[in-house]
Image: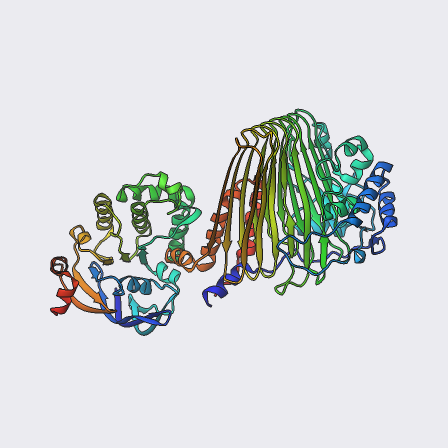
Amino acid sequence: MSETDALDSVVSQPYKYGFKTEVEYEEFPRGLNEDIIRMISEKKGEPEFMLEFRLKAYRNWLKMEEPTWPNVDYPPVDYNNIIYYSAPKKKPTLDSLDEVDPAILETYEKLGIPLNEQKLLQNVAVDAVFDSVSVATTFREKLAEAGVIFCSISEAVKDYPDLIKKYIGSVVPANDNFFAALNSAVFTDGSFCYIPKGVACPMELSTYFRINNEESGQFERTLIVAEEGSSVSYLEGCTAPMFSKNQLHAAVVELVALDNAEIRYSTVQNWYSGDKNGVGGIYNFVTKRGICKGVNSKISWTQVETGSAITWKYPSVILQGDNSIGEFYSVAVTNDKMQADTGTKMIHLGKNTRSTIISKGISAGESNNSYRGLVKIGKKADGARNYSVCDSMLIGDQCGAHTFPYIESANSTASIEHEATTSKIGEDQIFYLQQRGLDEENAVSLIINGFVKEVFKELPMEFAVEATKLLSIKLEGSVG
Amino acid sequence: MLQIKNLHANVDGIEILKGINLEIKAGEVHAIMGPNGSGKSTLSKVIAGHPAYEVTEGEILFEGTNIEDLDADERARMGIFLAFQYPVEIPGVSNSMLMRQSYNAMRREHGEEELDPLEFDDYVRGKLDLVEMDPKFLDRSVNDGFSGGEKKRNEILQMAVLNPKMALLDETDSGLDIDALRIVSDGINKIKSKDKGVLLVTHYQRILNYITPDFVHVLKGGRIVKSGGKELAHQLEDQGYEEVVEAK
């Protein structure tokens, strides 16, 4: 086996989450219009303000154009051929797992996320979103004791309308961009977390998203509010079956950190990425943004992006409060014909705000991996500092890595540092490790694990283990 | 231990080695000297199994086994070690992690139990003194940000840890100041033994003041054009390659 073949087999692993669960669905007709939106809102028993929010977003969306600036290429999406609401028929009752369709419980079991609380990691609470709806949220009582609200966004709209009204769309306005507007019009579920003043959330919160229906899109919405002096760590995981068609996933995540609050948001994204020839896979068009609204607040995004046919995503932080901190740690792996255009925006508005960007792109096969980042320093952001590192690693000679850093500074006291490197896993590196007795597969995996270490160490323990496993699954292969 | 018979090797279709014959027995130190471009470094890479080099003729026997079809890692686990002229940097992978994986790969090969990180730590710390290295080196990324001298010492440390049967030292002396040269040479002297073979590739005679070769070979144009004892090295130093080779 030649060097290149061995490398290929090392990075090309079959997708093991590609199974489909047979469940009965309640679906809305295909297509998008105001009636569909009214139906979604009615289905969810939403208050009037929510319907208004949706309709306004929809009317805006109609006037907007799909962005063409990302460094990705795909045929036009027919937004009228998507099912916007698709829910398993057996009605989920969130108080008891007994009433969740066993097939769905089994699905999460197979994904390694048992929803049975006894089986769960003791310090992780899970919200499971299956297609358009949340099917279960665990450890709610324990969290409630600490005053933490963790539930599906649909419930939150009904149970905590004041909080939702105050914060939804406050970080990502409904007309922010094409996909955010679409999401605002049709979002069907997602998670809501509220951490009250002074509370350190006693456990990790997590949401596992699963797209199961071939014809439906997933439009979830997550909102996390951390009140003064509170802190929370939130994890998000995603998988989907293998279909030959593309599914659209257009999510919006909003984070709000008030004075002295801290939010850590970690993602391991492993949507189905399509086959070797680029057939099928998820279009992952996501808007994630946090605002450090209060002084000394901190928002930290960590993402491990290993799936999706196309990823378009820029988890960002608006640093409004003085002395606030924004962080972005990212590993994006592309293989075969995958395309990723991902990065971050750090918008410095407050004084002495600081941001760190560590981006690691790994491209293999015929894939294309772009880092796109904006560091913007506002006029009043005296003493703002940014430090960015963008490293790209190429495996093989048919892939591409691109870096698009944008810097806009309106304050002369700001300090901005940007470093970028591109390296190739070379014959020499592999030979060196082989000469030390490691077989080729171990050599490649050691090099890659070393490359991503700076980012992986930012992940919470439970997730770091999972991410390392995921990476090694992607990397293990039959060499020779 | 190592027998090389009529070895021809190409890289990118260009023939670099044009019929090398060499035998190294256990306990012997052989020095390969020669001008730039003579094929010295190629020889050590071909023995170690670098995939860019193609053997077109001849054979390499290690302990009686023809190793031509074996991958570099298989050769390494048989006991062939190459100290690189330009050690490669592996960011994010700590020295101790690499050495433990290597050492355990060797142990697995010999049906021995692997060492856990604590056991390995004890083992490796015992080797640091050989090359006068600070334990801090163990936690640093492999060769990342190392000075030239540190990289070479690190190679010798790895050699001490892996304890190979056959050590190929590719211009280990290049770029070393006199102190580093002494440290590296001392390390090599402590590791070499009567059951090990050493092939020392060098451009200069000075390392041979520290490590005494049993045989010296002059390589030119991909062939060994002259062989002799350690005095040959001095002759080369005094008279230069041209004169010594012409006078054959």
Q: Quadrant of the C terminus of chain B?
A: bottom left
Question: In the rendered view, does A356 fall on the left or right side of A243?
Answer: left
**Residue furthest bottom as drawn:** B57
Q: Quadrant of the N terminus of chain B?
A: bottom left
| Quadrant housing residue A116 | top right
* Residue A165 vertical placement versus B176 (above, below): above
Residue A440 visible here? yes
* Residue A460 vertical placement versus B10 (above, below): above
In this orientation, which residue lies closer to the viewer: A435 or A83?
Answer: A83
Q: Where residue B222 sits in the image (x, y, percent)? A: 25, 69
| Quadrant housing residue B132 | top left
Q: Where residue A397 sits in the image (x, y, percent)? A: 50, 62
Question: In the rendered view, does B26 fall on the left or right side of A56?
Answer: left
Instruction: Look at the image and name its color scheme.
Output: rainbow
Tally of numbered tags = 0
In this orientation, which residue lies closer to the viewer: A117 or A204?
Answer: A204
Q: Where residue A243 sits in the image (x, y, percent)? A: 70, 61
At x 54% / y 45%, what residue is drawn?
A359
At x 30% / y 44%, what residue is drawn?
B127
At x 54% / y 48%, what residue is drawn?
A468
Question: In the rendered view, does B81 fall on the left or right side of A328?
Answer: left
Residue A114 visible here? no
| Quadrant housing residue A375 | top right
In this orientation, which residue lies closer to the viewer: B184 or B223?
Answer: B223
Q: Where residue B182 sits in the image (x, y, percent)? A: 21, 46
Question: In the rendered view, does A212 fall on the left or right side of B149?
Answer: right
* Residue A277 vertical placement versus A185 (above, below): below
